[in-house]
Each structure stands twice: as structure tokens, then as C-alpha cells.
Amino acid sequence: MALLYVDYGGIPLWINRLLGEPSVLSLQGRMDPAWFRANNPLACPQQCDCPIQWPTALYCDHRSLADIPDQLPDRTQYLFLQGNNISSLPSSVLTNITGLRWLILDNNKLQSDKLELASLQNQTQLCYFFANHNHLTSVPSALPAGLKQLRLAHNQISSINPKAFQKLQNLTLLLLQGNRLQTIKEGDLKGLLRLNLLDLSGNLFSTVPKHLPPSIQQLYLSNNSLSALDEDSFVGFLNLKYLRLSHCGLQNLGIHPQVFNSSSLVELDLSYNKLTSIPTVPTTLQNLYLEANQIQEFNVTSFCREVGPLSYSRMKILRLDGNKLSYHLLPPDWVFCLRVLRSIYI
């Protein structure tokens, strides 16, 4: 399978060429639009480009459009509208399209009260809906059940409609970073049975939100002012592998010794906090990022409660740079605990 990826909304977007997915997300500065029109017999709106390489893709991005063009070709599966001035999504604009798979509306001026429910509800083939960097104040309702990725980063979302996710059992990725969420109530994320990655970074949480889907494997909470991490903050996440908690103002007194006691955890990011010592982590953890804290001591017991032939840390990468440590001050027995370590930065 030939796969390429590019960065969209802070998380790479994997592209499957075998499915005919376009491998570029914009034609700006790449090809002469006049060439497309001269060589492509298919109908194409005047405000857009229709490359013959991807006959089901429609590129209307970065054109200063105030509205979505009318009479979109019914063959359209991949619609690129990012970088415009679009504020509304009328129900009539997509009625001619029945097989839409991607709808990219990043960097526009979308407003929640101007999104008509029927505009997306009838797009049963829609897999990706991107509306990062807009003016949305709530999560759109009536999204199609087949949706796999919903990217709503850097909006003004302060609350979640309890019915917004009820039918989205196929959603695997949800980006909500850079919004104004303070809490997540019970039932807000009901229906997200297969959610793998949830990004809640850069919101207004003061504690780790409850009522998150237990299926999550990647949880990003960086850039929230978290007052404490309780023993049960991450209980219930049986498959949690990647946890990001950088830039949260965390201090050792507010971190329960057992909060990271999860054998599934592979990577933990605690960089750019106010830690003075290394928190206790599971021996199965492989990557630990603690750079730019105020750590003054290196305790082997943070990694190994005991050291023996089968009792040692599986740590591979350990970042301690930007702290108050130096390599020559490390205790001599650290190498027996961290015996498979590949890289250490001090």
C-alpha cells in the first residue's frame, strides 16, 4: 500500500493512493490552472481547479471565496475549501453530491449558527470533516454516522451538545485543541466507541476531564492549567499508550504516586512543568519527556521499584535536559535499572 502523509490540524493525514485519494491538499503554486481547463473535458466551477490526475477532487482553496461555489460536480469526493472567507454551510450547496468523502474547510470564518444540519447529515459517505481555525462555538450536530475524523482545532468551542456524537461510532480521531472547553459532562462524548486519538490541548481545563471514552489510546492535554493529577485521573483507559501533559503547571505535590500506574503506557510527556523530582512511572514505559522542569535529583526508584535479572525499566528515550541535573551526579546504579536505554539527554 502506497501511503503519503501531510500535516493538517497538527496531526498527520495519511493518504491512500490505491483508493484514489489525492496526494496534495492544494494546487496553489504547483500548476497552471489554464492547463487544467485546456486538458480536462470534465465540467469544473470557474472558481476551482479540477486536475485530471484526480477527477473526483475539487480544489477551491485560497481564493478569498465568501461562499461555497454553486453547482458543484456530482462526481466530487474530495472538496478543498480551506483558506477562504466562508462563514456558512447552506443545506442546498452539497445536494448535488452524494459521494463526498473529504470536506476540508480549515482557515475560514465558519459560524455555528450558519451551519445548516441537513448540509452534512445527508453525506453518508463522508469520512473526514476538517474545520480547524474557524469561528465555531459548538460542535456541529447531525454529523454522518460514517465519519472517521473530525478536526475542529482552534475554534471558540465552549460546550458540547450531548447529542453531537451519539451516532459517531466510527470516529477514531477528534481534534478539539485550542478551544474554550472547561469541562466535559457525562454523556457529552457518548457514542464514541472507537475513538483512538483525542486532543484537548490548549483549553481551559483545571482538572483531567472525566467521562472520556475508554477506547482512547492517545490523549493530549498539554497547555491546560491542571491543578493536580489524582490516582484515578486515568483509570479506565486500558489501552492508553501516549499521554501528553506538557505546559500544564504541574508540581510534584499535586501528582499522585500511582497516577501513571498503567502497563499499557508507552510514552509520557511531562515537559515544561514545575517538577522538582521525577514522578514514579511504570517499568513498561519506553519514552519519557521531562525537559524544561526544575528537577534536582535523580531517583532510580522512580523507574525501578527493585532491580534484578527480570526487574528493570524498558525505558528507551529519557529527556532531562533543561533541568538542574548533570550527568556526573547520576547515581551509579542507574545503568542497572535503565539497562535498555538508547538515549538520555541531560
Image (spheres, grey):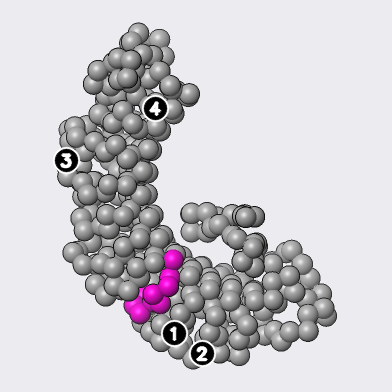
Quadrant in the picture for the C terminus: top left
Disc 4 target residue: 315
Residue type at numbered disc 1: Asn
**Which numbered disc flags the more N-terminal residue, 3 or 1?**
1
User: Which of 240 and 18 lies nearest the eye of the viewer?
Assistant: 18
**Rendered view: 36 above or below 235:** below
Disc 2 target residue: 95
Q: Residues within 10 Å of mark 1 (few under 14, many from 20)?
A: some
Q: Main secondary structure of the magenta part?
A: loop
Give coordinates of residue 317: x percent, y percent.
44, 28
Disc 3 target residue: 231
- Separation of marks 3 and 2 at Cα, in angstroms: 50 Å
Q: Is residue 139 magenta?
A: yes
Q: Is residue 90 magenta?
A: no
Q: Check disc 4 and report its element: helix, strand or loop.
A: loop
Give coordinates of residue 233: x percent, y percent.
20, 46
Left or right position of 67 against 44: left
Q: In this rendering, does residue 227 appear at all?
A: no
